[in-house]
Image (tube, grey):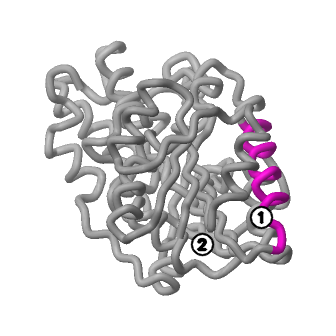
């Protein structure tokens, strides 16, 4: 099939595109800069110039495709503190895709996140694919996509772990936390650090995304999760060990000051099950888990 991919030169999509090309799909990738265009072309995809604000161009690209995969998100705006603006942009784009694909039976795969389902306190059990929320930031986009199943779109949402790790990860939460540890002189965790974060290797997540495009039933919510929940303190201690720095507790009231825009997330308890996803699509993670991947050293190499 012909597949239109947004964010095609990004961390996860750049691992998905080669899988799609190798499987015989014709891939067109969105690129907003010359550098991104060169990266998309090098992956074997056709380049579609544009950005997330070009709704007309996105509609045209979606209409000419047999399936759409939406990876792009305004992470730069989120890092500047404009999370609401990034969320609103994402919802506009997915609304446009939904309107364009309405009644066609074509596939739409969108990215979500497990962290949006993290409770304020300790989680009583791992979150499953059946758990949903009525509304909220990014929740509205997920619900929109899932709802397209009733409008003749084979839609699915891949809920990504907060840590998608590998040597391809240069701007995700792992390198951000490593950078903060270097800056502050210690690897921080909130409170006792017993809160849990799920994680998945980039290549395992990419394979799940490709399976979603090809096989996921309409309305599916899928979990890209290999490690169900790594205690955040263990995550911080492993970072500290590789940097030769201590790991220390950060008072919850100081989390925003220490972690910046991640301050509202680092103390969240977010254990996640992917049992239903594995059963539904026959997906099994095969690459190293988070702590083993950190021990490979690529995150700590000179210049990383």
Alpha carbon of mark 1 to alpha carbon of mark 2: how far? 28 Å
Q: Return the disc, 1 or 2, that comes first in the chain's sequence.
A: 1
**Camera-side mark, 1 or 2:** 1
Under tag 1, what secondary structure? helix
In the depicted structure, whether residue 202 falls above or below residue 33:
below
Name the residue that disc number 2 marks: 128
Q: How many residues crowd around disc 1 within 10 Å: few (fewer than 14), some, or many (20 or more)? A: many
Q: Which residues are the magenta region?
A: 87-103
What is the count of numbered marks? Answer: 2
**Main SS of the magenta segment?**
helix
Name the residue that disc number 1 marks: 101
- Residue 73, horizontal then vertical, whole percent: 61, 38
Residue for point 46% across, 26% down = 250
Confirm whether the magenta stretch covers residue 107.
no
Residue for point 73% across, 49% down = 60
- Residue 266, horizontal then vertical, whole percent: 52, 37
Relative to the observer, which residue lies in front, 48 or 284?
Answer: 48
- Residue 271, horizontal then vertical, whole percent: 51, 61
Relative to the observer, which residue lies in front, 146 or 245?
Answer: 146
Under tag 2, what secondary structure? loop
Q: Is residue 34 left or right of residue 140?
A: left
In the depicted structure, whether residue 163 falls above or below residue 187:
below
Q: Quadrant of residue 288?
A: bottom left
Q: Quadrant of residue 36?
A: top left
């Amino acid at each position: 099939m012909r597949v239109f991919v947004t964010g095609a030169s990004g961390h996860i999509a750049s691992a998905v595109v080669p899988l799609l090309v190798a499987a015989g799909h014709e891939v067109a990738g969105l690129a907003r800069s010359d550098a991104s265009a060169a990266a998309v072309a090098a992956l074997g995809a056709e380049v579609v110039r544009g950005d997330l604000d070009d709704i007309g161009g996105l509609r045209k690209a979606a209409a000419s495709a047999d399936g759409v995969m939406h990876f792009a998100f305004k992470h730069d705006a989120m890092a500047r503190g404009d999370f609401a603006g990034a969320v609103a942009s994402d919802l506009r784009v997915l609304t446009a895709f939904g309107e364009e694909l309405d009644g066609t039976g074509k596939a739409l795969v969108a990215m979500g996140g497990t962290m949006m389902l993290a409770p304020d306190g300790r989680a009583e059990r791992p979150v499953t694919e059946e758990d949903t929320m009525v509304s909220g930031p990014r929740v509205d986009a997920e619900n929109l996509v899932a709802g397209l199943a009733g409008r003749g779109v084979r839609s699915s949402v891949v809920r990504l772990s907060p840590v998608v790790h590998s040597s391809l990860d240069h701007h995700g939460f792992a390198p951000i936390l490593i950078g903060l540890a270097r800056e502050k002189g210690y690897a921080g965790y909130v409170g006792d650090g017993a809160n849990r974060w799920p994680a998945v290797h980039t290549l395992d997540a990419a394979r799940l995304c490709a399976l979603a495009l090809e096989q996921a039933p309409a309305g599916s919510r899928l979990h890209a999760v290999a490690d169900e929940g790594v205690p955040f303190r263990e995550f911080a201690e492993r970072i500290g060990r590789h940097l030769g720095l201590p790991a220390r507790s950060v008072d919850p009231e100081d989390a925003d000051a220490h972690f910046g825009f991640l301050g509202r997330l680092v103390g969240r308890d977010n254990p996640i099950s992917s049992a239903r996803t594995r059963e539904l699509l026959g997906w099994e993670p095969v690459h190293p888990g988070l702590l083993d991947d950190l021990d490979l050293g690529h995150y700590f190499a000179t210049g990383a």
